[in-house]
Image (cartoon, rainbow, N blue to C red):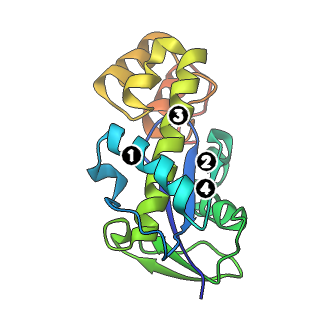
């Protein structure tokens, strides 16, 4: 049986894509220090991501864009990103262990594991790859839209981000279906209330 761990990063932010990672670990090359990416520092995640990419049997990262999130909702977009990551694995898996309480719809057998990113090493590894890839993408978006401070808050609804959003308006990478963004668009007459 070839097991891949799968997790996503970026469901809560107001901007940027949602990312997912899929990892098949090599039993002959165990990786020390794997745990839920949220419980690791940025430096620890970055260092582990290098080791995971080097020592895992197979890995892949995929994403769903802001437009896809707005079109199909964040839950479905997260599921789609996970499926894309699994399907992109150079070595195909025979079982997917998914962090959370539901699985993407696909042909591969999958099991959902609540808090799996802290219980299953392969899911921890997937969470680290998804988080580091998303952070890199947000730093890249910061270069295009520097006035929002994406390099600091990574798109999450921090005080700074909300203040910059009010000051500069909605960018092309903001998720229009998210309440703080939608309210601004409604106030500017760009959206009908309730849509």
Disc 4 vs disc 2: Cβ atoms closer than 8 Å?
yes
Ranked by sequence position, the earlier of labels 3 and 4 is 4
Please provide percent x and percent y for residue 81: 62, 57
Rendered image: mark on residue 45: 1
The span from disc 2 to disc 1 (Cα, nearest Å) is 26 Å
134 versus 95 height, above or below: above
Ranked by sequence position, the earlier of labels 2 and 3 is 2
Mark 4 lies on residue: 77
SS assignment at label 3: helix
SS assignment at label 1: helix
As drawn, is 107 to the left or to the right of 178? right
Ranked by sequence position, the earlier of labels 1 and 3 is 1
What is the quadrant of residue 121 in the picture?
A: bottom left
Task: Check the picture and name the quadrant holding the C terminus.
Answer: top right
The span from disc 2 to disc 3 (Cα, nearest Å) is 19 Å
87 versus 41 height, above or below: below
Rendered image: mark on residue 69: 2
In the depicted view, which residue is nearer to us: 127 or 82? Answer: 127
Mark 3 lies on residue: 136
Ranked by sequence position, the earlier of labels 4 and 2 is 2
Please provide percent x and percent y for residue 176: 57, 35
In the depicted view, which residue is nearer to us: 73 or 103? Answer: 103
SS assignment at label 2: helix
Please provide percent x and percent y for residue 102: 49, 74
Foreground label between 1 and 4? 1
Question: Residue drawn 49% across and 31% down?
Answer: 181
Q: Residue furthest bottom?
A: 1
In the depicted view, which residue is nearer to us: 35 or 185? Answer: 35
Foreground label between 2 and 1? 1
The span from disc 3 to disc 4 (Cα, nearest Å) is 19 Å
In the depicted view, which residue is nearer to us: 62 or 184? Answer: 62
């Amino acid at each position: 049986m070839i097991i891949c761990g799968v997790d996503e990063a970026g469901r809560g932010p107001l901007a940027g894509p949602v990312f997912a990672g899929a990892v098949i670990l090599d039993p002959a090359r165990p990786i020390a220090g794997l745990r839920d990416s949220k419980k690791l520092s940025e430096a620890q995640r970055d260092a582990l991501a290098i080791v995971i990419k080097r020592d895992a049997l197979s890995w892949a990262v995929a994403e769903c864009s802001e437009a896809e999130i707005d079109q199909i909702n964040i839950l479905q977009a997260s599921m789609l990103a996970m499926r894309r990551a699994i399907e992109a694995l150079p070595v195909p898996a025979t079982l997917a262990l998914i962090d959370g309480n539901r699985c993407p719809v696909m042909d591969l057998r999958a099991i959902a594991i609540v808090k799996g990113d802290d219980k299953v090493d392969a899911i921890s590894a997937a969470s680290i790859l998804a988080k580091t890839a998303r952070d890199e993408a947000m730093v890249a978006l910061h270069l295009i839209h520097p006035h929002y401070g994406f390099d600091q808050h990574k798109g999450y609804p921090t005080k700074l981000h909300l203040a910059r959003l009010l000051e500069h308006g909605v960018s092309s990478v903001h998720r229009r279906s998210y309440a703080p963004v939608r309210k601004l668009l409604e106030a500017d007459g760009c959206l009908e209330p309730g849509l």
